[in-house]
Amino acid sequence: MRKMLAMLLTVTMAASLTSFPMAEESGKTPMTPGTYEGSVQGQNDAVTVAVTVTEDAIESVEIVSHQETPGIGAPLTEEGYEGETPIAVLPGRIVEAQSIGVDGISGATFTSAAIKGAVKDALTQAGANIDEWSAAPEKPEPEQIEMTADVVVVGAGGAGLASAISALENGAESVILVEKCGAVGGDTLVCGAIYNCPDEELQSVETMTDAKKATIEAALAKEPVSDEHKALQDAVAEEYAAYKDAGRTDIFDSENWFALQTYDGGDDIADLDLVKTLTFNSKDGYDWVVDKGMQFADKIGQGAGSLWQRTHTSVMQMGTGFITTYVKKLAEYGDKVTYVLSTTADSLIKDENGAVVGATGTDKNGNTYTFHANKGVVLSTGGFSANSKMAQEYNTSGKWNDLSGVKTTNRLACSQGDGIKMATEIGADLTQMDQIQLLYLGNLKDGQLTKYPARVVNGTDQEIFINKEGKRFVQEDGRRDQICLASLEQTDGMFYFLESADGDYVDIDEAISADGFSLRFLEEQGYIYVADTLDEMAEKLNAAGANMTAEDLKATVEKFNECVENDSDPEFGRTLFSTKLENGPWVATPRQACLHHTMGGVHIDTECHVLDTDGNVIPGLVAAGEVTGGIHGGNRLGGNAVVDTVVFGKLAGESIMK
């Protein structure tokens, strides 16, 4: 089998390794020999390069400094991994081609453009005629390539990588992972990396409040929509009664309560069997990834929109912990694993009996592939929230206004709905395509789920949300859709997270954001505002476009602190209280609602088999992750998407090998 592994290249290439033309041979304008630094803004911060030139050649390109995202713009780990990232490979390719006209890396266009722009800056300083150094290298004639494996995984994000590991654990002798980007990871790399599951050990040190008790009682008193819903309520009622009879005061939780919250939180329209599959396997999935090396903080929290204190947070920034864990595990299988990167799957292949037996694809150089699958295909290509046209096409639920111009938290190269289109072409059924989620954690510059203080995602109990007028406007620990709808109605469609130096506090000069930036860097770049007093905070926010008085802001905080004292929020119904906001420094983080997750997708059963429009299993095809529908209903609870990728990714690998 042809091995399509992208090797990590060094960021410099010595002149002795490349044959450079002489000036009289090349006909190029002579440059002034020396080393020049160039710098251009990348995805996160400036990318600076040092370019050494002779009169006629680019001798070396070295990355001097960058802040690009691990796994996308830069290598995921110091050792690198199976994939191409611009920071790792573009400098060497520019030297080899003697041109800045080399192709960028799929899925990392901002970083690719920054590196080439920085080299251009340096060459200009050296006196080069840039047009003479911009020719695109010649490419070989496209080939037709055929590859065969037991399992073909289309889409190498979190769910796809999990399914590949699971298939190998269940006897697969070979797996091909097809990924449209230059490196694996997908949108899992930029997720908040929070994982929900009951965890008695960590929940035992937390206390049940009256507000939380009221939450359970309200769910049990709700009119059920079906016999199955009623049975789930009864199961929770029995468990909760036993909890109270035991005189316990720690956090109550169970697989049934997790299922009931997920189902109710999704407007009671999800497939309840799929909901139970998710929640009943959540702790096993957690143990499964931990066993493979995944590290979580040893404290339970309540993630943004998760509705309960069952949230585990990755130790590594964003989703890099999950992807690092997966690629290291897959590396243990050696030649059994083949990555085909920068290659977009085009279609699924059926045999004469209607079974899926492979897929086709095309890479960035025009090579075409036929992937033959002995056991079957795993479809794990993600949703369509980065495809604004497709999102607006299916935006028929009546919940949202026009979504065609709304930014997304997802990577633009991912979540384009590719797998959904391929599946429908072979007769797969779709379900709940009109159920689309926005998330209120997008930054104001590009909508990405980045550059926020760590407490924003997993410290809902230690902050409030305020609008430009300095007023609270929503239940901060409520449903994601309700928070997004409320935030869209605020002035300029944005708001601020406001937190103090109380509670689980880390010094401003030592704190690191969820994606690895110092808070002082975020302050300098305008992603957050830091002030010692609320008077100063009001002044800073007003200078940035807000319209609040210091008196109104202080009154808002004082009123919230009364809610904490009384364990009650009569105005908005907040249930999570742990910390009064009293001491500076204060941090305000501006955010907006952005397209985040599409709950609809390919229709699957509880073993991940894809169903056709008649409700029958399509042999040889399973699906996992956001490409599927029916699991989350009308509103996905925060943290459940990662659970989805783990639980159903693992199940998909098992099912394809049965």
Image (spheres, rainbow, N blue to C red):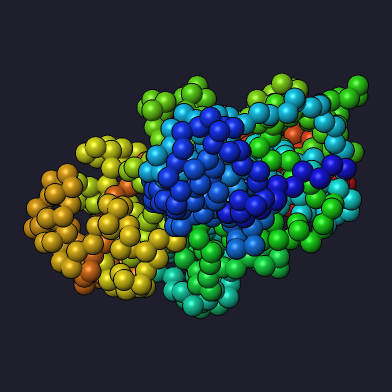
**Residue 635 coordinates in the image, percent (x, y):** 49, 42
**Residue 414 coordinates in the image, percent (x, y):** 57, 37
**Residue 415 coordinates in the image, percent (x, y):** 56, 36
**Residue 39 coordinates in the image, percent (x, y):** 39, 48
Relative to 211, is 544 above or below?
A: above
Q: Quadrant of residue 344?
A: top right
Q: Quadrant of residue 117?
A: top left
Q: Relative to residue 581, is residue 412 drawn left or right? A: right
Quadrant in which the N terminus appears? top right
Identify the residue at horizontal 28%, vertical 38% (top origin). 493
Identify the residue at horizontal 84%, vertical 42% (top origin). 2
Q: Relative to residue 116, is residue 8 drawn left or right? A: right
Identify the residue at horizontal 34%, vertical 42% (top origin). 445
Q: Relative to residue 80, is residue 460 drawn left or right? A: left
Identify the residue at horizontal 53%, vertical 44% (top origin). 58
Nearest the camera: 239 or 498? 498
Nearest the camera: 288 or 577? 288
Nearest the camera: 113 or 590? 113
Res. 275 visible in picture: no
